[in-house]
C-alpha cells in the first residue's frame, strides 16, 4: 500500500476535513480528495462519510487509522531525527495570550534557543482564534485556558493558576473586610463604588471570581477595559480600581505593597492552562522537546 496515500488518509482522519488536511500537507484540496478516493478503491471500502462540514470516519476508516497512525508517526520520528542530525531544525510556532506567553512560555523555552531552536510567536488573546490557527497549521503549539473538545488536536493540562482579587492600597482602605468575608451579608456589597478594570466588556475574570467566591454575578460594568493582563495590573497599581489577576502576574506587586489582596478565600478560584498540539505532531522532535520542557517547567509554576 502506498505510504503517501496512508499519510494523506491519517491527516484527513485527524483533521476531520479534506480542506484542513490539504493545508497541513501542503497539497491542494482536489489532490487530497483524489488520494482518498484512490485508497478507497484499493480497499474496496469507504473510509469517510462526507458531511456538509468536513468528514467523519467509517468504522473501517477508524480501524485503519488505529493501525496505521502509530507506524506513520514512527517513520516521521526517524525522518526528523535524520533531519536534525543533518543540522536542519524546524522553526517552532507558538500561540497564546500575550502575558502568559511572555511571562511563562518563552522563558521556559529560552534554553532551546541555545541549542539552535528558532521560535516564532503569535500573541492571541482569543483562544478560539488560536486553536483554529493550530488546526489549520498556522501554529505548532498553543497555550490556552480553553480546553478544546474533540477535533484534530490533543490537549494536556499544564498548570493551575490562582486568581486574586486586588486593588491599590487607597481603594483597599475603603473596603470593610468583615463585610467582604460575610457571604450572608452579600460580600460584593463591600466593593460597591470601586471602579473595575478588566480585559473585556463581558468581565470574564471578575464574573468567574464572583461566581466561585461570592456565588453571585457582578453588577458593575467595567470602568477600564484593556486586553492585556499586564496592562490591567499596571492600571490597578496606579489606582484605577480593582481587578482579578493571576497570582504569578501580581505577586511581585503584592510583595512590594503596591497592590493589596482584598480577600484570601479558603479555596481560591483557579484556572487550568493547557498545552495543545495537533494530534500526532509530537512525532516531530522539535515540538516534542518544547512540549516536554513546558510540562517540566510548569511543575514550579
Image: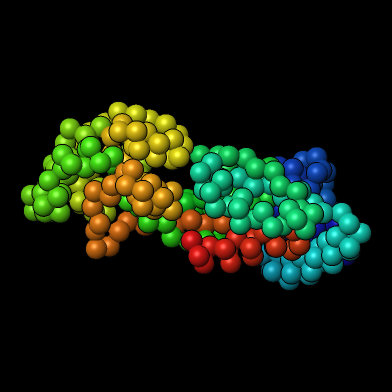
**Residue lying farthest front?**
256
Q: Is residue 52 visible?
A: no
**Residue lying farthest right?**
86
**Residue lying farthest top?**
223
Work out whether residue 199 or residue 26 is closer to the camera in this orientation and state it: 199
The residue at the point 72 percent across, 50 percent down is 92
Indicate the position of residue 220 as horizontal and vertical percent values: 22, 33
Indicate the position of residue 284 as horizontal and vertical percent values: 75, 60
Q: Where the N terminus falls, by quadrant?
A: bottom right
The residue at the point 67 percent across, 54 percent down is 110
The residue at the point 16 percent across, 36 percent down is 192
Indicate the position of residue 3 as horizontal and vertical percent values: 86, 61
Q: Which quadrant of the view contains residue 156?
A: bottom right
Indicate the position of residue 280 as horizontal and vertical percent values: 69, 61
Work out whether residue 65 or residue 241 is closer to the camera in this orientation and state it: 241
The residue at the point 47 percent across, 50 percent down is 146
Tell me: 164 left or right of 121.
left
Tell me: 289 left or right of 178.
right
Tell me: 119 left or right of 244.
right
Q: Is residue 53 above or below residue 15?
A: above
Work out whether residue 45 or residue 285 is closer to the camera in this orientation and state it: 285
Work out whether residue 92 or residue 131 is closer to the camera in this orientation and state it: 92
Amino acid at each position: 500500500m502506498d505510504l503517501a496515500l496512508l499519510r494523506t488518509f491519517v491527516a484527513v482522519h485527524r483533521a476531520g476535513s479534506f480542506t484542513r488536511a490539504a493545508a497541513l500537507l501542503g497539497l491542494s484540496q482536489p489532490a487530497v480528495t483524489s488520494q482518498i478516493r484512490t485508497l478507497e478503491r484499493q480497499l474496496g471500502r469507504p473510509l469517510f462519510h462526507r458531511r456538509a462540514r468536513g468528514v467523519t470516519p467509517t468504522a473501517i476508516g477508524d480501524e485503519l487509522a488505529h493501525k496505521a497512525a502509530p507506524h506513520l508517526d514512527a517513520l516521521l520520528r526517524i525522518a526528523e531525527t535524520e533531519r536534525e542530525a543533518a543540522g536542519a531544525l524546524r522553526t517552532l510556532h507558538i500561540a497564546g495570550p500575550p502575558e502568559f506567553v511572555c511571562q511563562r512560555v518563552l522563558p521556559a523555552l529560552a534554553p532551546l534557543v541555545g541549542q539552535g531552536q528558532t521560535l516564532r510567536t503569535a500573541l492571541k488573546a482569543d483562544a478560539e482564534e488560536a486553536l483554529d490557527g493550530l488546526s489549520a497549521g498556522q501554529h505548532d503549539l498553543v497555550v490556552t485556558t480553553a480546553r478544546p473538545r474533540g477535533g484534530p488536536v490533543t490537549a494536556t493540562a499544564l498548570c493551575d493558576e490562582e486568581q486574586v482579587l486586588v486593588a491599590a492600597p487607597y481603594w483597599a482602605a475603603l473596603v470593610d473586610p468583615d463585610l467582604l468575608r460575610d457571604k450572608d451579608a452579600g460580600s460584593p456589597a463591600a466593593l460597591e463604588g470601586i471602579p473595575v478594570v478588566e480585559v473585556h466588556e463581558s468581565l470574564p475574570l471578575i464574573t468567574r471570581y464572583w461566581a466561585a467566591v461570592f456565588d453571585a454575578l457582578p453588577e458593575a460594568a467595567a470602568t477600564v477595559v484593556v486586553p492585556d493582563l499586564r496592562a490591567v495590573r499596571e492600571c490597578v497599581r496606579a489606582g484605577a480600581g480593582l481587578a482579578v489577576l493571576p497570582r504569578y502576574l501580581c505577586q511581585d506587586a503584592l510583595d512590594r505593597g503596591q497592590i493589596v489582596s482584598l480577600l484570601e478565600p479558603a479555596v481560591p478560584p483557579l484556572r487550568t492552562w493547557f498545552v495543545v498540539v495537533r494530534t500526532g505532531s509530537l512525532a516531530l522532535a522539535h515540538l516534542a522537546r518544547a512540549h516536554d520542557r513546558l510540562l517540566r517547567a510548569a511543575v514550579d509554576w
